[in-house]
């Protein structure tokens, strides 16, 4: 069993798949803290978790022509200037279960918890690439990452991001060795992972083994044949993966974490909580909440760290305390967020349905009963 050596996990996690291990925290735990504690941070593994020895670990950076290739130990990586940033990581499949309700899709049944936030610390990718002789360049190029996890045929997890993002100090792409002040947990990429702020989880390659600069995107299955969006009309017989760009920045997202769907709430006043986030460093400027299915709206209070313009890498938590209208026996609670590009979430799922069940960001809806 290649999974026999996987780490022990927190019992509160809701497991979507045991081998490989995929799990999300229950919603009310997810928004209990602005920073997600490591043991309940959602986990998305495609393969068994490698058991890497930090003393012999080496990160291979392929050098530029005329530059030099690097073989970096953990100590070497610690010798680069250390940066620490708060970044929210979201899987492209977050909230896929709502797409499944429209029509069947291929993928894990994530609810609202395939998203979490941590303080990540490490070396900047641009500093390490510069040492290997790489420079920003005019022509299109991509930085390809390879993980040290692999399937029985030896194929490793891989992904890429554009060189322009990797070399941009403002993009703050990290080779992270710490998560919330601790060495990375094994499930989250020990000893080193990529953190690409504002970009879909799939590019944050864990157990990082090799970095190279190529004229084309990574040839990995997960870059080319997965994590792409399509029209609702495209099915598995007609899909042409080469016709769509790989997902990088994600669209604006929000979800309700309390109360839970189907719950009975007290009459009088109800407290509604959730999260909101947008890709590409776009800040969340507002979250609107409705108790009547979207007829009338109230503005939620945003909590958590202030967001920096163009570098809003982390989510806002939000809450709304609202009186329950007298005589009301049920509430149809809805939330929707707006980012600083005034991008909004679509009101329903069906028009954004896609065969892979990615980019599920419609208004989030929760139906509750009111106690008599
Ligand atoms: N990196 C490797 N090496 N192997 C993987 O399976 N999964 C990716 C990404 N990096 C993956 C990986 C996906 S799809 C996501 S959403 C994130 O890791 C999840 O990171 P987490 O498990 O730390 O939450
Ligand atoms: Mo993912």
Image: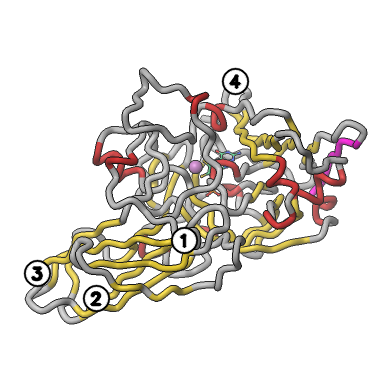
Q: Which mark is residue 270?
A: 2
Q: CA distance from mark 4 to mark 2?
A: 53 Å
Sequence-first disc among 3 and 2: 2
Let me know if residue 297 appears in the view.
yes
Q: CA distance from mark 3 to mark 2?
A: 13 Å
Sequence-first disc among 1 and 2: 2
On the image, numbered disc 4 is attached to which residue?
153
Residue 276 picture location, percent across and down = 43, 62
Relative to the observer, which residue lies in front, 224 or 74? 224
On the image, numbered disc 3 is attached to which residue?
329
Indicate whether 353 appears above or below 368.
above
Asked which secondary structure carries label 4, the reply is: loop
Sequence-first disc among 4 and 2: 4
Residue at point 52%, 63% (across, down): 283
Asked which secondary structure carries label 3, the reply is: loop
Sequence-first disc among 3 and 1: 3
Residue 170 picture location, percent across and down = 70, 57
Residue 241 picture location, percent across and down = 48, 25
- Camera-nearest label, 1 or 2: 1
Q: Is residue 168 left or right of residue 104?
A: right
Q: Is residue 353 left or right of residue 56?
A: left
């Amino acid at each position: 069993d290649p999974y026999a050596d996987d780490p022990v996990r927190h019992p509160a996690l809701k497991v979507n798949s045991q081998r490989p291990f995929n799990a999300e925290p229950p919603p009310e735990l997810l928004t209990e803290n602005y920073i997600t504690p490591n043991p309940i941070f959602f986990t998305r593994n495609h393969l068994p978790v490698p058991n890497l020895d930090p003393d012999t670990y080496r990160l291979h950076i392929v050098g530029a022509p005329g530059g030099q290739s690097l073989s970096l130990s953990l100590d070497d990586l610690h010798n680069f200037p250390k940066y620490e940033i708060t970044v929210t990581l979201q899987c492209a499949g977050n909230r896929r279960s709502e797409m499944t309700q429209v029509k069947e899709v291929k993928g894990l049944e994530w609810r609202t918890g395939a998203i979490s936030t941590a303080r990540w610390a490490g070396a900047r990718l641009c500093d390490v690439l510069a040492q290997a002789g790489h420079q920003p360049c005019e022509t299109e190029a991509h930085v390809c990452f390879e993980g040290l996890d692999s399937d029985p045929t030896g194929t490793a997890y891989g992904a890429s991001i554009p060189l322009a993002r990797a070399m941009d100090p403002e993009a703050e792409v990290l080779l992270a060795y710490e998560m919330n002040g601790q060495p990375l947990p094994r499930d989250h990429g020990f000893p080193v992972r990529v953190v690409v702020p504002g970009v879909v989880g799939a590019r944050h390659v864990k157990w990082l083994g090799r970095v190279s600069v190529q004229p084309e995107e990574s040839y990995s299955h997960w870059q080319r044949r997965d994590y792409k969006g399509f029209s609702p009309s495209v099915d598995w017989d007609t899909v042409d993966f080469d016709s769509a760009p790989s997902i990088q920045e994600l669209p604006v997202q929000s979800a309700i974490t309390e109360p839970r769907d189907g719950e009975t709430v007290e009459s009088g006043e109800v407290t509604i909580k959730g999260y909101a986030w947008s890709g590409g460093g776009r800040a969340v400027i507002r979250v609107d909440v409705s108790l009547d299915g979207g007829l009338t709206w109230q503005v939620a209070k945003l909590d958590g760290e202030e967001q920096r313009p163009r570098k809003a890498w982390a989510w806002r938590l939000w809450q709304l305390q609202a009186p329950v209208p007298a005589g009301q026996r049920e509430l149809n609670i809805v939330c929707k967020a707006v980012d600083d590009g005034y991008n909004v979430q679509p009101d329903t799922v069906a028009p954004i349905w896609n065969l892979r069940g990615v980019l599920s960001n419609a208004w989030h809806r929760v139906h509750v009963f009111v106690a008599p």
